[in-house]
Image: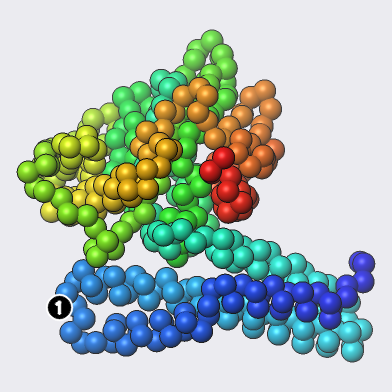
Amino acid sequence: MAETDFPTELAELRDTLRRITDVLDVESLRAEVTELEQQAADPNLWDDQTNAQRVNSQLSHKQARLDRVTRLASRIDDVELMAEMAQEEDDTEVLSEAVSELASIRQALDSLEIVTLMSGEYDEHDAVVTIRAGAGGVDAADFAEMLLRMYTRWAERRDFSYKILDTSYAEEAGIKSATFEVNAPYAYGTMSVEAGTHRLVRISPFDNQGRRQTSFAAVEVIPLLEGTESVDIDENDLKIDVFRSSGPGGQSVNTTDSAVRITHLPTGIVVSMQNEKSQIQNRAAAMRVLEARLLLVKKEQEAAEKKELAGDIKASWGDQMRSYVLHPFQMVKDLRTGYEVGNADKVLDGDLDGFIEAGIRWRAQGGDNE
């Protein structure tokens, strides 16, 4: 085992952590947590359920971010003591553990540093992700379902809370579309780099001649907005349809008209929700997503941005941002950042951190403005 210069390594780790805490403004973060804790302790908090949910959500997110920083500082102190004891007692086993812990802390700092690169207006918010099957027929529907599993597995790996809001199943296999919500600090800033068209190349399991098939799926990511940031929506601009929720193959899974589809007539934006138990819950969830999409439209119009809205992703040739190749070899490659991995199965099982971190660094360097 190569000798490790612990004093130098520890000094570098502390310097990195100091830069991160400066950017995150940890003192202000502590003050915000204290203020939110006081609001959460107010016995009258739940008189206003919307505000109560906002307070508790913000407290959870900010406390998690503060804990992440303080735990890293503690780990650096602990590994310093471990290394000193191991060197004094010439304990090679403990010394090896200290070296491994150094590498683990360095990796954790790299991940935390990614947070400092997320400075967008809505990056701190929860995220709503919609996956739609694109060109490629039944293979595209199957690919869309593979992506849904990939993202939910990724969320589980990171202990992020998520909730499936709506699923539209395809007739033969897979899904036409699915919408889910991710509740975690910087969920939108993290997942927004996944927006775009994804391409799958494989031997189609649905082709009895065993031919190679290329299929596409579109991923849209929008921020879940607080009530104070919502846009005003005229009820006269809405067409609201109710219908029965259904599962794979059209089998009824609900005996009442609890599913809701809301169409915003001026823009043509359509939002469907069917996974909640009641029509009221599905309508509330659909309105939240509609408000988020309308606010993004408004922001883009005000800024006169030239890029297309997330919902306009073509999901076809010439538009892809990432390729998943399962035949004749395995490879997943992000076409924006150049980041690639040779084990596609591992990626499709939720091992996405490398792609997401590369995407965030690429975006911070102005890659999405090129």
Residue reaching furthest to the top: 209
On the question of residue 301 being in view, the answer is: yes
Residue 173 point in image, percent of width and height = 38, 27
- Residue 168 located left or right of residue 196: left
What residue is rendered at 22% in x and 55% in y? 231
Residue 175 horizontal/vertical position (percent): 36, 32
Q: Which residue is mark 1?
A: 47
Instruction: Residue 212: name its quadrant.
Output: top right
Which quadrant is home to the N terminus? bottom right
Residue 291 coordinates in the image, percent (x, y):
24, 51
Frontmost residue, 333 versus 361: 361
Query: Of helix, strand and loop, which one carries label 1?
Result: helix
- Residue 112, given in percent of the width and then of the height, sits at 59, 66
The residue positioned 71% from the left and 85% from the top of the image is: 77
Name the colour scheme: rainbow
Please identify the quarter of the rendering in which residue 137 is found.
Answer: top left
Residue type, mark 1 in image: Asp
